[in-house]
Structures are given as C-alpha cells and as structure tokens.
Image (cartoon, rainbow, N blue to C red):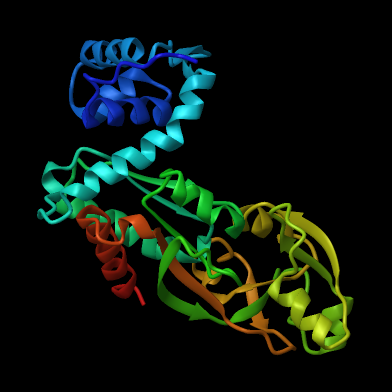
C-alpha cells in the first residue's frame, strides 16, 4: 500500500488535480485558473510527492491519468464538494468564479433555451467558460452528476428518479409525427402509422420508448427501420425517405426544422423536461446561482 503525505495538500491543489484530469492538459488547466503553466506543473509535482504517484503520463497530444489517479478521482470530487459546502453560507460572486460551468443534456428540443443560457451567462460574465456535454441515455444521469462531471443536467424525465438527485420541472411538449413532405404526406390513420417505416433514437438500451409502450397497450406494433444516436443524425437520415419519426414537437424549431409534422394517430403522453442536480449541491450558492440562471433563461423562451 502506498504511503501518502497530505499535510501540504489543500483544496486548491485538489481542484487543480480534478481540472487536469477533466481537461487532460496542463495548459488548459493553467488557462482555467488564470496562472502560468509552470505554476500548474509545480502544483502537480507537489501532488505527486504527496500522493507518491506520477498521477498523469503523456498520452497522445495531452496527458492521461494513471490507475491511482483514476481511483482517486471520485473520492477527491466528494472531498472538494464537502469543503465547498463548509462555506456555502457566503454569497456567490459569479465575476470572481474562474471554474467552468458544465451542463450535460440529451435534449436537442431545448437548443433555443440553451442558447439563451449562454447569452445570459456571457452578459453577466463574458470571461466565464460554459461547457455543454453529451448526456446520452437517462441512465447516465446519476453517474454524471454523482461524479461531478456536470453541475446540472437537462433531460427528459425518467420513469424512476434516483434518490440522490433533485429536479426542477421545466415544461412538457406533445409528441408529433415528423416526415419529409417531398417524399410522403402526413399520417392519417392508425393502420397507416403502424405499417409505415419508423426511425427512432437508439441509445443502446433495451427499455421501451413512450411510443412502444403506448402501442403495446393497444396490442399494436410498428417496424423500426432506422435507429440513430442523436436527433440531428435522425433528422438527416429521414430526409429523402418515406420514413417517419415520432418525436417532441419542439424539435421543429431546431434539429428537425427541415421536416414537416402532423398529429400522432394514437394518444401519447407528453414529453416532460426537467433540470437535475445532485442533492449534495442543493444548498451550494454556486449551484443555486446556475440553476436560477437556467430557469430564467428557459422561462424567457417559453
């Protein structure tokens, strides 16, 4: 077992460690903290001495973590969160914050609102870094937020919400049928809908979609001819074919704006969008400030 000497390790060093891990770069971390690369390199050397491990090694054009660093990351994230929680009674100053905000999402439906989030944040602090990263399936909500890979998540509401997460409901949106009007016309009956060739999102999960569950209740089936990992790809794949896709109506204003849509011939529940965050940050002034900014930005667009 390795011996650690953490007597000279403080919260700033731990934050630098996490930044290097997330960015895979000393230079990017230096830019994030507003210091020179030599300062970050010196901090990394102190951590290497304290933790008795190289921590990061050259990997392509950047650096990658050692096995020890990988093992330490989740524990260090929780330690940093607990330390920040000690001062959560202080006011948050966005102008003094040099750490990037990270929002993870899998909903292209909210693209106009996300643009508004960006604009509002830049208006308050033009130097603030804002990252939008891919969430993937709703099954990754908990690990993404528990491991501090994102500050908040914007997602379609899952059937079961992990106990460690809290949420703020945004809006609901009806599901409609999208199609290429140059190839085919709108769906006019349930029979036509079931016999049509369907395109759907595919995150590699075996969970049934809203549409499949609704069809099951009617003892009906459909043929999924095409699966795509994201809405933008799905929209491009449908173009020029007679396929249809049953998606949130809001996509007509973003990823599926080149298609037409019509009402679904079956009753479908609306798609519900929520913002999620980890409970340990419920009283964090920084996280609260971001959540309020997102809520204001979305409300201004609805």
Q: Is residue 33 visible?
A: yes
Of residues 289 and 285, the one nearer the viewer is 285
Of residues 173 and 47, the one nearer the viewer is 47
- Image coordinates for residue 231, horizontal then vertical, percent: 61, 58
Residue drawn at x 53%, y 68% is: 161
Q: Is residue 181 visible?
A: no
277 left or right of 127 in image: right
- Image coordinates for residue 232, horizontal then vertical, percent: 60, 55
Residue drawn at x 44%, y 62% is: 165
Of residues 220 and 22, the one nearer the viewer is 22
- Image coordinates for residue 239, horizontal then vertical, percent: 71, 60
Query: Which quadrant: the C terminus?
Result: bottom left
Q: Is residue 262 above or below residue 141?
A: below
Q: Is residue 296 above or below residue 50?
A: below
- Image coordinates for residue 7, horizontal then vertical, percent: 23, 20
282 left or right of 164 in image: left
172 left or right of 230 in image: left
Q: Is residue 67 above or below residue 259?
A: above
**Figure disc tally:** 0
Residue drawn at x 40%, y 14% is: 3
- Residue 211: quadrant of the picture: bottom right
Of residues 210 and 159, the one nearer the viewer is 159
- Residue 218: quadrant of the picture: bottom right
177 left or right of 94 in image: right
Residue drawn at x 50%, y 15% is: 1
């Amino acid at each position: 077992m390795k011996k650690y000497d953490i007597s000279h390790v403080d919260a700033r060093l731990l934050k630098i460690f996490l930044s290097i891990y997330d960015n895979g770069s000393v230079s990017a971390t230096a830019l994030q903290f507003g210091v020179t690369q030599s300062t970050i390199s010196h901090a990394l050397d102190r951590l290497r001495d304290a933790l008795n491990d190289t921590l990061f090694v050259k990997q392509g054009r950047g650096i990658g973590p050692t096995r020890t660093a990988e093992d330490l990351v989740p524990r260090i994230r929780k330690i940093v969160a607990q330390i920040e929680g000690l001062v959560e009674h202080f006011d948050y100053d966005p102008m003094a914050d040099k750490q990037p905000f990270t929002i993870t999402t899998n909903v292209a439906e909210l693209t106009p609102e996300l643009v508004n989030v960006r604009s509002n944040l830049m208006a308050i602090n033009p130097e603030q870094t804002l990252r939008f990263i891919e969430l993937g399936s709703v099954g990754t909500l908990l690990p993404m937020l528990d491991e501090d890979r994102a500050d908040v998540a914007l997602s379609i509401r899952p059937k079961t919400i992990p106990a460690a997460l809290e949420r703020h409901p945004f809006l609901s949106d009806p599901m409609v049928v999208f199609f290429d009007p140059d190839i085919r016309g709108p769906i006019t009956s349930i029979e036509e809908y079931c016999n049509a060739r369907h395109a759907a999102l595919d995150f590699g999960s075996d969970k049934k979609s809203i549409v499949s569950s609704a069809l099951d209740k009617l003892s009906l089936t459909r043929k999924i001819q095409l699966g795509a990992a994201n809405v933008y790809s799905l929209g491009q794949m449908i173009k020029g074919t007679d396929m249809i896709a049953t998606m949130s109506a809001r996509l007509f204003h973003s990823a599926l704006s080149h298609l037409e849509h019509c009402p679904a011939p079956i009753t479908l529940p609306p798609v519900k969008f929520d913002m999620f965050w980890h409970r340990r940050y419920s009283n964090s002034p920084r996280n609260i400030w971001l959540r309020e900014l997102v809520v204001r930005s979305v409300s201004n667009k609805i």
